[in-house]
Image (cartoon, rainbow, N blue to C red):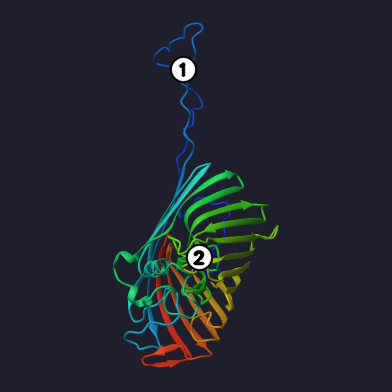
């Protein structure tokens, strides 16, 4: 699952993938009439001893699903230069004082009894940033950096209408080996984290710092098994973090365990780990990520906790985030998040040792079915001066964001 707690629907870990989507149509089988009228033409009687005419086998049922998203926002950066400067260290909300098409996505799924297929295509600023991480051929950006690791360009320089704005977010096939075991092959989103790429599926609009320190995508194989109705296991063998063409001869392994306590559908615990060499050569240090996500529904609200630990050689960082969401009415909800990260030996990429803190408050209003407005106020803080304000550098930055989300 990818970076912070699945803040709106947690990046849930589906271990026996089935087709998902906003709307689904099923191709029905022909239903025989309750009473057949007499034939208008007499049927031929087969000659004695002749074989009966073969009956054509009926096609297996096929279901189709689809989903769509249009995500636009406008941000005011109260700390940076009001005319040009976007915030430092953010995942996808990287531009200020500008209407931004953050992400437009279309997804389609096909499902049968034994095989399934999923394709998600996206475009916009988010697509350019994810593609930058793929091009870098390494890990996602560190929690405190401005652009994805491996890319020499700041995120703001990647935001133009070009081929880099088009993203194949997912494209994989699923072989259902048994009713409880399935194998995915292709490109799929990460299992780590409490948040996902699509803002409409998160509780808050901006992503946490933790989301910025875990992978976006993987390419390879993923085995999903339902051990019991409450316990699901996932095993992965992939190129690495975000790289479709691997940057070394090694591979990255992944293990994820999802547990839903019996008789408690409102509580989920997911622990995920990825481990492998991510350097652009055969040697180097092993990168190890351990990600834990806990969510619980309580009446009209939900609470979540996300904890991450990442180690590469002697450098490491760890952090935690707590978040919650409460529906005051069917149309209006309030959400909040508080997090911290501590880094040692330059693991975050800014200085030697560093501590980051963040607090976010958001109100979401569903204007009509499938259309939502979100207003968010966020403050980022550090024990070192890393946030830019014109030519100055300071220890904090404050932003306000209005977002419009249309999703099906």
Q: In this view, does 95 lie above or below 268?
A: below
Residue at mark 2: 282
Residue occupied by mark 1: 53
Q: Earlier in the sequence, mark 1 or mark 2?
A: 1
Q: Quadrant of the C terminus?
A: bottom left
Q: How many marks?
A: 2
Q: Position of residue 336 (x, y in %)?
A: 54, 77
Residue 108: x %, y % from top left? 42, 52
Left or right: residue 159 compared with residue 289? left
What x and y, as percent, mark residue 264?
68, 60
Badge 1 crowding class, 10 Å Cα cut-off, few under 14, some 14 to 19, many 20 or more, is few
Q: Is residue 152 above or below residue 120?
A: below
* Residue in the foreground of this view, choosing between 24 and 247: 247
Q: Which of marks 1 and 2 is in front?
A: 2
* Image x and y of residue 291, in percent: 59, 69
Residue found at x 52% / y 88%: 382
- Helix, strand or loop at disc 2? loop
What residue is rendered at 46% in x and 17% in y? 53
Q: Which residue lies furthest to the bottom in this view?
A: 392
For the residues bearing labels 1 and 2, Cβ distance under 8 angstroms:
no
- Residue 192 image-quadrant placement: bottom right
Q: Residue at x 56, y 81 (%)?
A: 341
Q: Could you give the CA–CA distance between mark 1 and mark 2, rounded to whole angstroms?
A: 63 Å
Q: In which quarter of the image is residue 308?
A: bottom right
């Amino acid at each position: 699952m990818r970076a912070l707690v699945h803040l709106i629907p947690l990046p849930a870990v589906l271990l026996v993938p089935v087709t998902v989507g906003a709307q689904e149509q099923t191709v029905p089988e022909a239903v025989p009439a309750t009473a057949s009228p007499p034939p208008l033409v007499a049927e031929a009687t087969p000659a004695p001893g002749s074989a009966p005419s073969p009956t054509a086998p009926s096609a297996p049922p096929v279901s189709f699903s689809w989903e769509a998203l249009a995500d636009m926002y406008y941000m005011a950066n109260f700390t940076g230069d009001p005319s040009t400067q976007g915030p430092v260290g953010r995942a996808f909300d990287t531009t200020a004082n500008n209407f931004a098409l953050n992400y437009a996505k279309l997804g389609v799924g096909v499902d049968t009894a034994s095989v399934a297929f999923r394709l998600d295509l996206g475009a916009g600023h988010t697509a350019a940033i994810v593609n930058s991480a793929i091009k870098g051929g390494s890990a996602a950006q560190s929690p405190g950096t401005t652009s994805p690791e491996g890319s020499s360009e700041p995120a703001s320089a990647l935001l133009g209408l070009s081929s880099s704005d088009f993203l194949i977010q997912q494209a994989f096939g699923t072989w259902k080996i048994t009713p409880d075991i399935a194998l995915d092959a292709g490109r799929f989103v990460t299992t780590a984290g409490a948040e996902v790429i699509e803002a409409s599926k998160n509780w808050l609009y901006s992503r946490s710092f933790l989301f910025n320190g875990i992978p976006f995508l993987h390419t390879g194989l993923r085995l999903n098994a339902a051990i019991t109705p409450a316990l699901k296991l996932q095993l992965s063998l992939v190129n690495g973090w975000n790289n479709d063409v691997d940057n070394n001869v090694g591979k990255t392994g992944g293990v994820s365990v999802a547990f839903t306590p019996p008789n408690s559908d409102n509580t989920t615990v997911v622990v995920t780990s990825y481990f492998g060499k991510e350097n652009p050569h055969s040697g180097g240090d092993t990168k190890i990520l351990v990600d834990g996500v806990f969510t619980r529904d309580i009446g009209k609200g939900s609470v979540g906790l996300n904890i991450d630990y990442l180690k590469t050689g002697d450098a490491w960082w760890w952090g935690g985030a707590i978040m919650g969401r409460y529906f005051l009415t069917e149309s209006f909800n309030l959400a909040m998040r508080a997090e911290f990260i501590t880094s040692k030996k330059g693991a975050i990429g800014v200085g030697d040792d560093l501590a980051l803190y963040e607090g976010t408050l958001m109100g979401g209003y569903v204007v009509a079915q499938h259309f939502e407005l979100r207003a968010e106020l966020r403050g980022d803080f550090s024990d070192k001066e890393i946030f830019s304000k014109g030519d100055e550098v300071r220890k904090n930055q404050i932003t306000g964001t209005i977002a419009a989300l249309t999703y099906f």
